[in-house]
Amino acid sequence: MIGFGSRAHLYARPEAREPLKAFFARIFGCDPETIPGTTMLLCRMDDGTSVSVEFTPDALDDEHALRGAWLEVRTDDPEALRSRVTAAGLPQVKKDGSDRFYFRAPGGQVWGINAMPRS
């Protein structure tokens, strides 16, 4: 059996640092921390997963990030998360052939909202 791990690592341009800190706090409810000895941010999610962001000037810009990896976040309340995203004014992204709610974070990364699997 093969599956994805519980961590993701992203790249973003330095000017996205503060907007991404606010994004992680407001949308995902985590308190981003700086990884000691680096300028990277770490966001630990409630379920034990984490996302780190490394800031570099050669990261994809907002438009080119649409051609980067798309991420999925799972939640037990997709509508509440979607409401926070909408209230924050984050742009929605439409994907042909999908009815999933996708949106762009500061820095251009695309996220999709999916319901947490029921046990």
Image (cartoon, grey):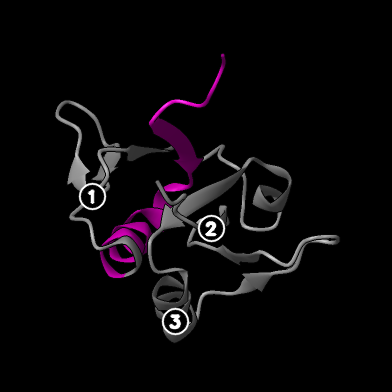
Residue receiving disc 1: 46
Image coordinates for residue 20, horizontal then vertical, percent? 37, 58
| Labels 2 and 1 touching (C-beta < 8 A) | no
Q: In the displayed image of the protein, which residue is found farthest to the bottom?
A: 87
Image coordinates for residue 72, horizontal then vertical, percent? 54, 49
Amino acid type shown at disc 3: Ser
On screen, residue 73 versus residue 36, left or right, reads: right
Callout 3 environment at 10 Å: few (<14), some (14 to 19), or many (20+)?
few
Q: Which residues are magenta?
A: 1-26
Who comes first in sequence, dot 2 or dot 1? 1
Residue receiving disc 2: 114
Magenta stretch: includes residue 52: no
Disc 3, SS: helix
Residue receiving disc 3: 83
On screen, residue 71 versus residue 55, left or right, reads: right
Quadrant assignment, res 91: bottom right
